[in-house]
Amino acid sequence: MAIPDFQSAMLPILRLAQDGRDHTLRETVESIASEFKATEEERNELLPSGRQRRLHNRVGWAKTYLQKAGLLEPNGRGRFRITARGQEVLQRRPSRIDMKFLEQFPEYNAFAALRHEASNEQASAPEVPSSTETPEEILEDSYQELRRRLADEVLERIKACDPKFFEKLVVDLLVTMGYGGSRKDAGQAVGQSGDEGIDGIIKEDRLGLDVVYIQAKRWTKPVGRPVVQAFAGSLEGQRARKGVLITTSAFSRDAREYVRQIEKKIVLIDGGELAKLMIDHGVGVTEVATYTVKKLDLDYFGEDE
């Protein structure tokens, strides 16, 4: 089995609390993981942001919705317990509890109405569908989709630019990432005209303790093993130990397998990775809006959850 969506976790959570005792979110997550036979990998799966485990997020939201419907109640220090209404619901032996089921409770409807009103205040915001995803998952999925679209746009622009601009783009990215020393140093080190791209040597760090050999291919066809082998040979001729091969296209499987087998350190950056690096380091893109998602500081309140 896999980890449940947050709606599928609602009934098991309410059953866990049926004993009337106080329960913590941590033990609830463990109980749900065991009930759904989640593997260790599934238990540790993170949201795309890498800041929270997906299972923990889903269980937390399932608990929140149950509390908003009056089936659970908080009892301080991150603990919760079942209410009389929750016990009454379990006596009915429901086969499933989900957001549709919770609509019979006025407290839940009031909460849902507030959420709907808040979302409507943003005219450009898309309507949030009735989903098995938590709000964080919806937000992060939307963010990742925006990144994918932007990466596609960035890559298309790179492919359409002339070689000199591509040369400048690579230099700007490397300097922004901390390579090459100053922009002037990097521009002097990288800039010799090469085969449909640029070739040159750039400092690995600002002190110039080591250098990295750079080759860039503004291609549409995949870069195969022979090209990577030739690049490795160029490294040998330069007595260089490290290299970065950048392309606007992709690398063949043989090419990637080859760099794993050789002693020299060669990093392959394909078009998709190049676009992502530009987005991450703010090269060729501009910020439109910033959203900060906050959570309760449990340390401040002296809780252990």
Image: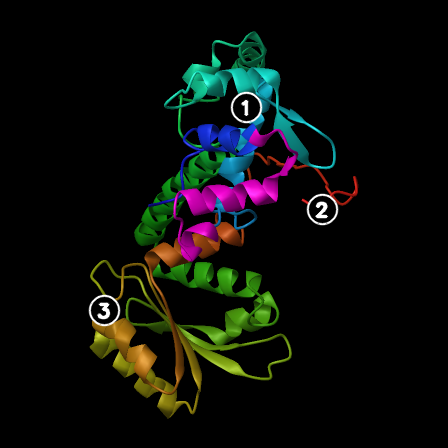
Give the distance between the C-alpha atoms of the residues marked 3 and 1, in whole angstroms.
Answer: 49 Å
Neighbour class for label 1 at 10 Å: few (<14), some, many (≥20)?
Answer: many
Tell me, yes or no, whether the highlighted magenta stretch contains residue 108.
no
Neighbour class for label 3 at 10 Å: few (<14), some, many (≥20)?
Answer: few
Circle 3 is placed at which residue position?
253
Circle 2 is placed at which residue position?
304
The kind of secondary structure element at disc 2 is loop
* 140 to 18, vertically: above or below: below
Say whether residue 159 is left or right of residue 187.
left
Numbered badge on residue 129: none
Q: Main secondary structure of the magenta part?
A: helix
Q: Amino acid at mark 2?
A: Asp
The kind of secondary structure element at disc 1 is helix
Q: Amino acid at mark 3?
A: Arg
Q: Earlier in the sequence, mark 3 or mark 1?
A: 1
Tell me where residue 267 appears, x and y as whole percent.
40, 72
- Picture residue at 49% right of the left edge, 64% below the top: 171
Tell me where residue 296 appears, x and y as whole percent.
69, 37
Between residues 141 and 81, which one lies in front from this camera angle?
A: 81
Numbered badge on residue 66: 1
Q: Earlier in the sequence, mark 2 or mark 3?
A: 3
Give the distance between the C-alpha atoms of the residues marked 1 and 2, in whole angstroms.
Answer: 22 Å
Magenta region: 19-44
Q: Amino acid at mark 1?
A: Leu
